[in-house]
């Protein structure tokens, strides 16, 4: 069995969260560039150019893309032939988050829900661990701002509401958010499972590369249909009106109970910060 020391995981987390917050990925930059040609409004086009300039300044000056450097959402896939040594995986992750947010001058946003007292180091991380085949550890970080996260929701539809019910729910959430989640947005939709798995699926959907369609033809068709419908909403870049409200929509689906149709919507902003590393 391959041994991976927790120090490597802490180091990876430190590096990934700083990198994600300073450098918008090429995939997002390319998508923003392409969206200028799709945007019908001159103001909308200029807003997208400003977002690209903002990302460029952040990269050159080693500062965060946005002041909201998010909660430290972390997905780890641990190969079942890996033995984590030297301490607890969750402690190693929190230590990596602590160091990244301190060293990178990233805003610490985690607080007590009632007192609103800041935890002081952006911990605990929002950690999701999955056991997978193999002897590797894959870490994906997704610092997630509050402005976009606030417009996510899980709704337990009934089966008779079907695809039309799902579509109406997604559009309701996008319209409710309007300019607040800093469009152009990315929409993650989780369908099926139960209440908690649909929410997780919607977050996982956000980790798909922009422009990639689901391998399931029916799901891929739904992604395109939802993207077109959202872009017809007229909200536009940063809510100034226009034809580019969303950069993409990703849907993840799994079987559900015969009596239920769980659907979750998770909205991401243009500052779609994501990084991964395999150890
Ligand atoms: S929604 Fe995104 S871009 Fe807007 S303030 Fe939050 S993190 Fe920043």
Image (tube, rainbow, N blue to C red):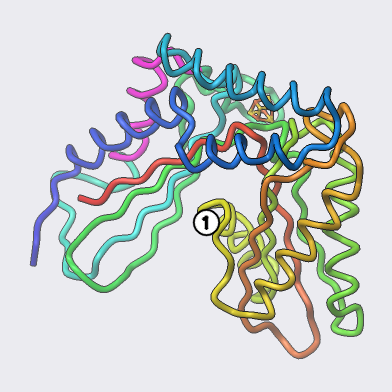
Task: Give the percent coordinates (x, y) of residue 42.
Answer: 83, 25
Closer to the camera in the image, 107 or 19: 19
Q: Quadrant of residue 162?
A: bottom right
Residue 94 is a magenta residue:
yes
Closer to the camera in the image, 262 or 205: 205
Q: Quadrant of ligand 1?
A: top right
Residue 100 is a magenta residue:
yes
Q: Residues within 10 Å of mark 1 (few under 14, many from 20)?
A: some
Say left or right for 94 vs 202: left
Picture quarter with the N terminus: bottom left
User: Residue, x 86% and y 31% (percent of image)?
Assistant: 41
Say left or right for 160 vs 85: right
Task: Give the percent coordinates (x, y) of residue 194.
Answer: 67, 73
Q: Main secondary structure of the magenta part?
A: helix
User: Residue, x 87% and y 26% (percent of image)?
Assistant: 240
Vertical placement of 222 versus 96: above or below? below
Vertical placement of 132 versus 45: above or below? below
Q: Mark 1 vs ligand 1: CB under 8 Å?
A: no
Closer to the camera in the image, 114 or 14: 14
User: Residue, x 74% and y 23% (percent of image)?
Assistant: 47
Residue beneath disc 1: 208
Most distant residue in the bottom direction: 258
Q: Quadrant of residue 271?
A: top right
Vertical placement of 165 versus 61: above or below? below
Task: Give the percent coordinates (x, y) of residue 222.
Answer: 74, 70
Secondary structure under tag 1 reads loop
Vertical placement of 107 versus 239: above or below? above
Residue segment shown in magenta: 92-106
User: Residue, x 51% and y 36% (percent of image)?
Assistant: 273
Say left or right for 18 vs 238: left
């Amino acid at each position: 069995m391959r041994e991976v020391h927790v120090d490597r995981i802490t180091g990876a987390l430190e590096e990934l969260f700083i990198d994600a917050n300073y450098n918008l990925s090429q995939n997002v930059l390319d998508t923003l560039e392409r969206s200028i040609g799709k945007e019908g409004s001159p103001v909308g086009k200029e807003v997208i150019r400003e977002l690209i300039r903002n990302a460029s300044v952040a990269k050159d000056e080693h500062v965060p893309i946005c002041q909201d450097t998010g909660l430290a959402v972390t997905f780890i896939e641990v190969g079942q032939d890996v033995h984590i040594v030297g301490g607890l995986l969750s402690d190693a992750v929190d230590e990596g988050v602590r160091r990244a947010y301190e060293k990178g001058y990233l805003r610490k946003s985690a607080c007590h829900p009632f007192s609103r007292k800041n935890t002081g180091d952006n911990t605990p991380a929002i950690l999701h661990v999955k056991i997978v085949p193999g002897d590797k550890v894959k870490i994906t970080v997704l610092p997630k701002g509050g402005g976009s996260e606030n417009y996510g929701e899980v709704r337990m539809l009934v089966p008779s509401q079907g695809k039309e019910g799902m579509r109406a729910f997604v559009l309701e959430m996008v319209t409710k958010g309007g300019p607040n989640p800093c469009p152009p947005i990315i929409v993650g939709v989780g369908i099926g499972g139960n209440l908690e798995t649909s929410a997780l699926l919607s977050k996982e959907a956000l980790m798909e590369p922009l422009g990639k369609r689901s391998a399931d033809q029916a799901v891929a068709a739904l992604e395109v249909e939802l993207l077109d419908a959202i872009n017809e909403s007229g909200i536009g870049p940063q809510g100034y009106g226009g034809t580019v409200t969303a950069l993409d929509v990703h849907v993840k689906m799994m079987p559900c109970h015969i009596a239920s149709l769980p659907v979750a919507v998770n909205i991401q902003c243009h500052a779609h910060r994501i990084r991964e590393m395999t150890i």
